[in-house]
Image (tube, rainbow, N blue to C red):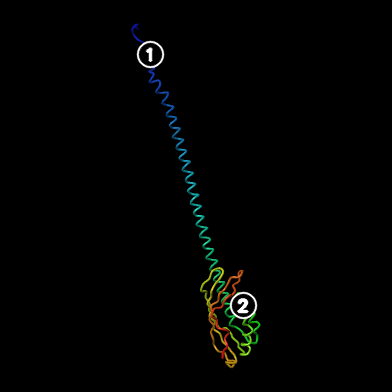
Amino acid sequence: MSKDAKEPSNDSDPATADATPTAEPRTETAAADDRADSWLRGRTAAVAARVGVAAVLCASLATSMVLFVQNQHNKDLMRAQEQAREAACQYGPVLADYDSKNLDTYFKGVLDGATGDWKKQFESTSTELREVLTQGEVTSAVTDTQCAIRTADEDSAEAIVVIRQTITSLGTQHKPKPGQLSMVLSLRNDDGRWLVEKVNSPTPPAQAQ
């Protein structure tokens, strides 16, 4: 081999030598960053989805509670209206069914279902009413009762009551005579029991002449 011939150099180009070692760490770092970003986005999406589901559930529960309360209120109102109607239907005949020979039972029944102003009014006129019915030998029997609620809530109500009756007295020579009694009853819910507190424009117990 000629002395002038140069042996291949084992030295590498500094630029080349520096390029390869630094390229791999950047690639691994970028991949790690991508994996971290992907994991973070996944976790964020999962949390957001859970929050969204929770919000929907809360809204659904709130709506259900509102509907439940409204439905319960409607049921309570309907129950109160029916109870008031039944009380009015029962009390109307009490006012129109009497016998001059047994007025104690009549007065007791009227006062038992009364309250407020109506009770005071009936008590104050009972003595006079007793005399009139006794002297006229008046008897009344109910033949039909129609009643309906005009207005009502859970505490108070107004009911229309129409009663057909037959009346006998000295004036009819003790022969039955048909009659009709119409009234508006104002009722109040007294601890679950509906009582009449006002009788609007009633005709007094009929006295057939």
Please give left or right for residue 71 compared with residue 108 in the image.
left
Residue type at mark 1: give it.
Ser
Rendered location of residue 71, percent (x, y): 52, 63
The residue that label 1 is drawn on is 9
What residue is drawn where x is 47% and y is 38%?
40
Whether 5 is drawn above or below 140: the answer is above
Which residue sits furthest top? 3
What residue is drawn where x is 53% and y is 61%?
69
The answer to which quarter of the image holds residue 4 is top left
Residue type at mark 2: give it.
Lys
Quadrant containing the N terminus is top left
Secondary structure at badge 1 equals loop
Please give left or right for residue 101 compared with residue 4 in the image.
right
Please give left or right for residue 1 compared with residue 47 in the image.
left
What whole-number distance in Å separates the C-alpha atoms at marks 1 and 2? 130 Å
* Numbered tag placed on residue 120 in the rendering: 2
Rendered location of residue 133, percent (x, y): 61, 87
What residue is drawn where x is 56% and y is 85%?
165
Whether 27 is drawn above or below 157: the answer is above
Q: Earlier in the sequence, mark 1 or mark 2?
A: 1
